[in-house]
Image (cartoon, rainbow, N blue to C red):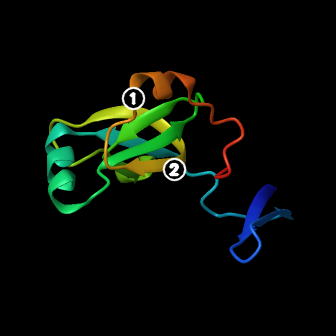
Amino acid sequence: MKIKYIMSSSNYHVEQEIVYENNKYSDNQYIGYYSKKQFENISKKHDRPYIYYKNKDNELVQITEVKQKKNGGSLFKDANSVGAIDVFMYAFQEPVSEIVYKQFDTSNSCFQ
């Protein structure tokens, strides 16, 4: 069961809809990776290179790549695993400040 949030642009009204689904991907574990070299490549091509996910410990982590655990690790040799990730949160032009990072609460994220 998931709660789906629907926002109408015409009246800025948010509705909740409970969605019961059998997601074939729900049991697959996704792993986040961060590579400095990959980040540099992303920064040259995209205007929002700072990509953040919520991990399984409900912490905000910056990543450069997401892969299913069964598909192996990153192809970038300098990549480090940030562990199992859960939900995409944001992509920014600038890094999230340390103050915001520490205060970030994902428990009521609209992406859950």
Q: CA distance from mark 2 to mark 1?
A: 18 Å
Based on the displayed image, in which of its 4 quarters is residue 33 positioned? Answer: top left
Name the residue located 60 percent from the left edge and 60 percent from the top edge. 25
Which dot, 2 or 1, sits closer to the camera?
Answer: 1
Based on the displayed image, in which of its 4 quarters is residue 23 positioned? Answer: bottom right
Q: Residues within 10 Å of mark 2 (few under 14, many from 20)?
A: some
Q: Where residue 76 sits: x, y (%)?
A: 17, 45
- Secondary element type, mark 2: strand
- 56 horizontally vs 18: left or right: left
Q: Where residue 99 sits: x, y (%)?
A: 46, 22
Based on the displayed image, in which of its 4 quarters is residue 44 positioned? Answer: bottom left
- 77 horizontally vs 30: left or right: left
What amino acid is labelled 2 in the image? Phe
Residue 37 is tagged as none
Q: Which residue is mark 1?
A: 97
Depth check: give the residue in front, 97 or 58: 97
Q: Earlier in the sequence, mark 2 or mark 1?
A: 2
For residue 27, above or below residue 56: below
Q: Residues within 10 Å of mark 1 (few under 14, many from 20)?
A: few
For residue 29, above or below residue 42: above
- Secondary element type, mark 1: loop
Q: Which residue is mark 2?
A: 88
Name the residue located 68 percent from the left edge and 51 percent from the top edge. 110
What amino acid is labelled 1 in the image? Ser
Does the residue at mark 2 contact the one at mark 1 (Cβ under 8 Å)? no
For the N terminus, the image quarter is: bottom right
Q: Where residue 77 sits: x, y (%)?
A: 15, 39
- 90 horizontally vs 1: left or right: left
Furthest toward the bottom, the residue is 10
Q: Where residue 103 sits: x, y (%)?
A: 56, 24
Furthest toward the front, the residue is 11
